[in-house]
């Protein structure tokens, strides 16, 4: 008699980030590894997608968990997000959730402007507000991309929430520039928008105490299978990204996506030296406490 499947819940994020989970569920990889995985779309994330996207200029005015706060409430036990945001949220947790590994998705964000915009290079954005989502990848990668071209106090970021809100703000002329991920970068290019700069970045997986070494290892094996499936042929899965683009913009389909932007690797352990470099950069920008050390934020038992 087969052993019962071990249950866990994983947050469903934007498709470009969560594609390995989507593929693993569709292909039965979780079950093959002894897991019963529920992919949870948080109500707060759905509300964020539908909201108007009010502009804020102070990142301290927004709590770091955003829609990921379900990890604090027991709505799910595992979630993936950008490296920097995961470190900050793991610092802020009250439930003991910790980083367990790097995620499979290697993501990219690009700063876009309208076709008629006078801006053409990163230096042109000196003092210009760029729409981001505070405590998310768009926020941190924008600081990293622009600070190489201007003084820190000349980098101006403003929170306008999730990517559809930031994209709409640029389309409507309410903001001059915005950082977005796929499928919004490809949509912007199809609409004739200009990409000012673009950079790839890693993400991390965070899990609560219910995810023991056995569950983590099984998730890891399922994600590796999903990465192999995606890298063999990603095209059957592109409709998940396309579905995030609402009607009302240019006609947009899977053929409009630039496949080299969609990168997926086997999840890897999060090394202490990599953590230190990122932590030091975040401390410099006032985004994390210096006292937030590797042993406090990363589950070394699981990594080992």
Image (cartoon, rainbow, N blue to C red):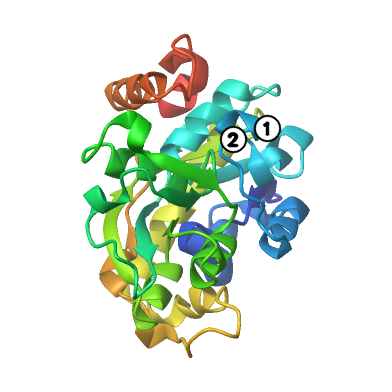
Mark 1, residues whose alpha carbon is within 10 Å: few (<14), some, or many (≥20)? few
Give yes or no for contact between labels 1 and 2 (Cβ–Cβ under 8 Å).
yes
The quadrant of the rendering that contains the C terminus is top left
Residue 207 numbered tag:
2
Mark 2, residues whose alpha carbon is within 10 Å: few (<14), some, or many (≥20)? many
Q: Residue 102: give x, y in percent of width and height.
A: 40, 40
Q: Quadrant of residue 148?
A: top left
Q: Give the residue drawn at x 38%, y 80%.
A: 235
In the image: residue 48, left or right of residue 231: right
- For disc 1, the marked residue is 210
Q: Is residue 77 visible?
A: no
Q: Give the residue drawn at x 46%, y 63%.
A: 16
Q: Residue 284: give x, y in percent of width and height.
A: 36, 20
Could you tell me which secondary element the residue under label 2 belongs to? strand
Question: Looking at this view, is 137 or 204 the one in front?
Answer: 137
Question: Looking at this view, is 116 or 137 the one in front?
Answer: 116
Q: Give the CA separation, mark 1 to mark 2.
A: 8 Å
> In the image, is residue 240 above or below residue 131?
below
Q: Is residue 204 visible?
A: yes
Q: Quadrant of residue 294?
A: top left
């Amino acid at each position: 008699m087969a052993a019962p499947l071990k249950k866990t819940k994983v947050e469903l994020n934007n498709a470009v980030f969560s594609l390995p989970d989507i593929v693993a569920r569709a292909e039965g990889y979780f079950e093959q590894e002894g897991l019963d995985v529920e992919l949870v779309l948080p109500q707060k994330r759905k509300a964020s997608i539908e909201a108007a996207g009010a502009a804020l200029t102070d990142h301290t005015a927004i709590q770091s968990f955003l829609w990921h706060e379900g990890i604090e409430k027991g709505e799910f036990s595992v979630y993936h997000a950008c490296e920097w945001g995961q470190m900050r949220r793991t610092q802020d947790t009250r439930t003991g959730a910790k980083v367990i590994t790097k995620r499979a998705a290697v993501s990219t964000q690009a700063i876009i402007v309208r076709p008629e915009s006078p801006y053409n290079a990163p230096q042109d954005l000196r003092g210009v507000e760029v729409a981001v989502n505070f405590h998310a990848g768009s926020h941190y990668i924008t600081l990293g991309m622009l600070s190489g071209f201007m003084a820190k106090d000349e980098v101006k970021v403003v929170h306008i929430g999730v990517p559809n809100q930031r994209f709409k703000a640029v389309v409507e002329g309410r903001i001059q520039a915005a950082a977005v991920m796929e499928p919004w970068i490809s949509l912007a290019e199809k609409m004739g928008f200009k990409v000012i700069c673009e950079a790839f970045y890693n993400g991390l997986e965070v899990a609560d105490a219910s995810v023991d070494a056995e569950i983590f290892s099984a998730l890891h094996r399922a994600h590796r299978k999903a990465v192999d499936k995606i890298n063999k042929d990603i095209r059957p899965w592109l409709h998940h990204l396309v579905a995030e683009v609402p009607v009302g913009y240019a006609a947009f389909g899977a053929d409009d996506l630039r496949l080299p932007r969609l990168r997926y690797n086997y999840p890897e352990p999060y090394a202490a030296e990599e953590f230190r470099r990122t932590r030091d950069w975040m401390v410099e920008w006032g985004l994390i406490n210096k006292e937030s050390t590797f042993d406090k934020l990363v589950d070394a038992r699981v990594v080992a």
